[in-house]
Image (cartoon, rainbow, N blue to C red):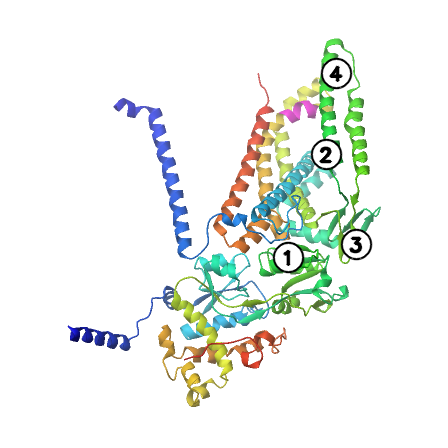
Amino acid sequence: MKAFLRDRKVRDIFWQVLASVALVAVVVFFVKNASDNMVKAGIASGFNFLWRDSGIEVPFNLTGYKPSDTIWALLWTGIVNTLLVSVASVFLATVVGFTVGLMRLSRNWLLSTLAAVYIEFVRNIPLLFFVLFWYFGVLAALPTPKESFDFLGLIFLNRRGLSIPTPNDVSGFHLALLAVLVLVVVQIVLARWARARQARTGQDFPVWVVGFVLCGALPLMLFVWAGALTSWDLPILRGFNYRGGFVLVPEFVALFMALSTYTAGFIAEVVRGGIQSVRQGQLDAARALGLTPGRVVRLVVIPQAMPVIIPPITSQYLNLIKNSSFGAAIAYPEIVAVFMGSALVATGQAIEIIAITLGIYLTIGIAVSIFMNWYNARHKLVTR
Amino acid sequence: MKFIALAAAAVFVAGTAQAQQLAPSATLDAIKARGHIECGVHLGLPGFSFANDKGEWTGLDVDYCKSLAAAVLGDSTKVKFTPTSVQQRWAVLQSGQVDLLSRNTTITFSRNATLGVNFQGINFYEGQTFVVRTKAKVAAVKDLADATICVAAGSTEEKMAADWFRERNLKVTIINFQKNDDAISAYDQGRCDAYTAGIGALAGQRIKFKDPAEHQILTEIISNDPQGPVTRWGDERWQLVVRWVLNAQIAAEALGVTSKNVDEMKAKSQSAEVRRLLGVEGKFGGMMGLSDDWAYNLIKQVGNYGESYERTVGMGSALKLARGANALWTKGGLLFTPPFQ
């Protein structure tokens, strides 16, 4: 018996179980206490409100949401808008961040100074200021609807956003998209076959030319064909505004620009740190082997810098996703604005709504972390 | 046996006659202990609750809280104002951070039924309308079809505007901002064709535009938004005080008692209701656990409802709102108080 108690494994399990039980007990206690007090104070609780009619207008949504839908549909619209602006901003922030980071390391004085000024400027300004600056900057730069910038009479840009035509019947586009997917798969198989053949026989195959036709020209033709088949919903000036088509609202553009330019400043520093962590000897050796400067960066520097860059860049991505909540300040209908703003005040169920929002951010964040860790593990430097 | 029961009843009656037994009131006890009232007001709405350049709060809703302080503590300056946003207000009240809300909050069924709050009367009948640019040539609300409208998220105006246009099959785009001020500045920047709020609120907010003369407030009203002080559920005696301080403001106007003539009225008035209101007869204050000169104090220090209205939103203010629905019921308005009997 004594030996059993002294067993390290047994003791570890014992303490872990005890800690978990205590944690669960504390959570249960607080939840029960809160709900008892809410009942006493006459405050409604529970999750039934999710199936109530929302009655809230969302000016920018990709989910087809209407005010007569439920609050659950409103929440989903908010999630989609959060993800949309986050994904778009992560993409641009990465591109700009890498560019500025490399500029910062350039031997060209002008390039590196410009990059340094940009980084210091961005990193030392509060994000809220940045978001409002972009928002009112975007609004001030654009004309009123009656004086819109007009592109071929089809696309209109003004203070109310960018109005673009949309097809009334999208089935042609679905077919075209499917065809493009098939073409891409064909291209990948072809490239593999060509490489294998080259390794075996030394015969070359014009993969790039075929790829251009298969993945560039053919899809373009397919989309033009699909577009010609359907009628279009064109933006038309009616009364105050352009109606019809799809409107990309200035709130989206402002938040997208603010998030990506802001996060790019941080990513630039991460990239610089990663590249500088590659030892000089590696560069010298690569040059001594006669590699061109481009190949030195691509084959020697980047693969060794990536494991250093990816973990901090993951935190920057997570920050960006969380920072998308600043959209609430400029009426971009993301989850905090529509759910923790409009829906919370309409229903008054603060605890449930905040818990749900918390859960959603947590889920998105953990999913991003898992993906980035997987990516990092896959691209880890194989050392022998 | 009968005699004992009778004697017991007599002792009980004598006991209660000597000192009226009051229901316990945690809120009143807390206010008396800390020496001031915690009043939740609007973030900044000229005419209703607005901190001037000296940091002093003024406005109709602020005056109500000052009256409450005068009635409860005998001094109208013993109020601490907590500015609350549209989103914060319920949590601030429910958590007990403030003793009441007095902040342009519309009385609605679902708020009363699900938020654990009670509405204690109406101190302002608000109606929703729109402000537009004069050059847009809008005469009626229906002319706003296809317009973009800025609004504060979570307000009754947000839902009301959405419902109003939907019921009439008119398409509008509604942009929801978290704060009134953000919605106003976005409208001012040209993001929207109109900004919507209550007509009283708009009269005050108009001052915030870059060029107020370029804008026009529509006279058409699309809703009925009665507003007044709000308390938590529970503590009925505190709710009683909040309700009857508002009634006292209105009764004072109806009975012709003003801050200027209140001393004279107290000394000379023959009207039984005036005498009861001012504590000469009836000991009404004591029944609520306040001093008997509670209403005298609030009229003397803050004034009756009419005086407060004229000073904050009426002709004596920058807003120049006519009394309209907010006149006494005897003068064609909706303002009413049950009798002080």
* Above or below, comparing residue A113 to residue A209 in the picture: below
Identified by mark 2, the residue type is: His
Give the residue displayed 78% in from the left and 25% down from the top. A214
Range covered by the magenta-colored residues: A296-303
Residue indicated by mark 3: A237
Q: Which chain carries label 4?
A: A
* Image quadrant containing the C terminus of chain B: bottom left
**C-alpha span from label 4 to label 2:** 30 Å
Whether callout 4 and callout 2 share a subunit is answered: yes
Instruction: Give how far across and how far down residue A85 sits, in percent.
Output: 65, 42
Residue indicated by mark 2: A174
Q: Which chain carries label 1?
A: B
Give the residue displayed 48% in from the left and 61% down from the top. B112
Q: Earlier in the sequence, mark 3 or mark 2?
A: 2
Question: In front: mark 3 or mark 4?
Answer: 3
Question: Which is nearer the eye, B40 or B333?
Answer: B333
Element type at mark 4: helix
Q: Does the magenta stretch include residue A262?
A: no
Question: In front: mark 4 or mark 2?
Answer: 2
Q: Earlier in the sequence, mark 4 or mark 2?
A: 2
Q: Which of marks 3 and 4 is nearer the N terminus?
A: 4
Find out whether the residues at labels 3 and 4 contact each other: C-beta distance under 8 Å. Answer: no
Residue indicated by mark 1: B162
Q: Residues within 10 Å of mark 3 (few under 14, many from 20)?
A: some
**C-alpha span from label 3 to label 2:** 30 Å
